[in-house]
């Protein structure tokens, strides 16, 4: 497991080494300024040269051994024990440095009047290693810092797992769109072949184009709005082959489509639903109206269709179809609090109104079709 700073001791990049040196320089001068209140600045400057290595020993042992090996692996009891031992060792080291190194060679020479106090510190080690109360308080403070770091890591891990679960669910929902669409289109193709229609090859060709887009160009979080509209128009052209003059269809597009992106295949199920449950069940004249308006970063998408006379007016019947259920879940996951979906049902018509806050991406993506192309199938 990588340590919590993702730093490899044996292969330090120059920039990281410079950052560490800068950090310890700040620590060094900070302690120098604190102790300069009692001593001269020059004395404090030299005195802290002996103490900073002790702080470095404590920090790197904690950061590159105790945290990654024990705390982040869930061995909390061992971590507490070793943390206690580390603090004890660091405290003793600091005490010994002060009594036997820093004080004799610096303070005795520059502050001889304070030497009697320093001599009193040279008691037997078992009588004065450290102040117990100070040590306990320091241990509590360090525990708070360490556990706070652990909480941050756990929150980050939870967020990563939640994101992974979200992506898995989105992938599963998107995967269900493909067979649902394929099932509907194959049914249409089957109906044409039964009547030996010459339009069957055209349907197969159009179907292959749409499937190619689904399989190879929908593996991203966002797709070009222009390309999505083109796919909708290709699907509509396939459906219109079956109805000929019996279908009255309008597809109006307004607004600036440049640099606008939307979740792939988020609008297709609504048009599928209009054809499947609004026209295919009716033998007479039928109609479908589709309106797409882009205003700023807001897309408003309306699909309305006529209803068969024998279809009960129950909105839940339409809303319960697999395709609409999937798109509802995808909208909840991809556009939380950034979309509105309303469904209206009466005796004669069925209306879906979808409003989404579109995303604008910074990177430049290839233009798959021109503005004029979006009206090719209108």
Image (spheres, helix red, strand yellow):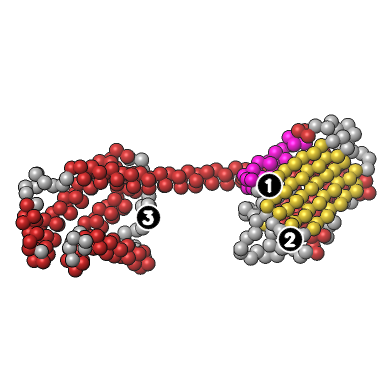
**How far across and how far down the image is residue 21, in percent?**
30, 65
Question: Is label 3 in contact with label 2 (beta carbons under 8 Å)?
Answer: no
Quadrant of the snapshot with the C terminus: bottom right
Find numbered disc 3 in the image and state the secondary structure of the residue it sits on.
loop
- Residue 35 covered by magenta stretch: no
Q: Please, is residue 100 above or below residue 133 in the view?
A: below
Main SS of residues in magenta: helix
Q: Is residue 296 visible?
A: yes
Residue occupying image coordinates x 82% and y 37%: 345
How many circles with numbers are drawn on the protein?
Answer: 3
Stretch in magenta: 318-337
Q: Residues within 10 Å of mark 2 (few under 14, many from 20)?
A: many
Q: Tell me which numbered mark, 3 or 1, is placed earlier along the sequence.
A: 3
Residue 5 — which label? 3
Residue 339 — which label? 1
Q: Is residue 170 left or right of residue 191?
A: left
- Residue 322 covered by magenta stretch: yes
Q: Nearer the viewer, residue 170 or 46?
A: 46
Q: Nearer the viewer, residue 187 or 193?
A: 187
Find numbered disc 1 in the image and state the secondary structure of the residue it sits on.
strand
**How far across and how far down the image is residue 136, in percent?**
23, 42
């Amino acid at each position: 497991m990588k340590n919590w700073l993702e730093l490899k001791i044996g292969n330090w990049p120059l920039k990281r080494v410079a950052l560490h040196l800068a950090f310890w320089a700040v620590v060094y001068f900070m302690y120098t300024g604190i102790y300069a209140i009692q001593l001269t600045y020059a004395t404090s400057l030299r005195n802290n040269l002996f103490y900073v290595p002790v702080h470095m020993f404590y920090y790197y042992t904690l950061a590159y051994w105790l945290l990654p090996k024990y705390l982040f692996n869930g061995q909390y009891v061992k971590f507490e024990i070793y943390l206690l031992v580390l603090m004890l060792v660091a405290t003793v080291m600091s005490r010994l440095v002060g009594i036997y190194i820093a004080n004799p060679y610096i303070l005795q020479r520059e502050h001889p009047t304070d030497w009697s106090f320093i001599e009193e510190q040279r008691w037997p080690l078992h009588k004065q290693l450290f102040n117990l109360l100070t040590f306990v308080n320091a241990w509590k403070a360090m525990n708070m810092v360490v556990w706070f770091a652990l909480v941050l890591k756990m929150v980050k891990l939870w967020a990563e797992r939640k994101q992974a679960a979200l992506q898995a669910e989105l992938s599963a929902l998107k995967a269900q769109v493909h067979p649902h669409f394929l099932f509907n289109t194959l049914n249409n193709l089957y109906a044409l072949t039964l009547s030996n229609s010459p339009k069957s090859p055209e349907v197969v060709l159009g179907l292959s184009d749409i499937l190619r887009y689904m399989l190879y160009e929908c593996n991203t979080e966002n797709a070009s709005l222009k390309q999505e509209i083109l796919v909708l128009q290709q699907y509509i052209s396939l459906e219109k082959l079956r109805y000929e003059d019996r279908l009255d269809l309008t597809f109006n597009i307004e607004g600036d489509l440049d640099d606008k992106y939307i979740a792939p295949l988020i609008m297709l199920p609504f048009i599928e639903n209009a054809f499947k449950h609004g026209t295919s069940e009716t033998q007479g004249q039928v109609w479908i109206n589709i309106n797409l308006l882009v205003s700023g970063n807001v897309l408003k998408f309306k699909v309305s269709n006529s209803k068969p006379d024998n279809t009960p007016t129950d909105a839940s019947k339409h809303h319960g179809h697999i395709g609409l259920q999937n798109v509802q879940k995808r909208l909840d996951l991809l556009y939380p609090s950034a979309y509105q979906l309303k469904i209206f049902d009466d005796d004669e018509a069925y209306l879906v109104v979808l409003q989404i806050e579109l995303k604008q991406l910074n990177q430049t993506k290839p233009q798959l079709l021109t503005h004029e192309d979006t009206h090719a199938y209108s």
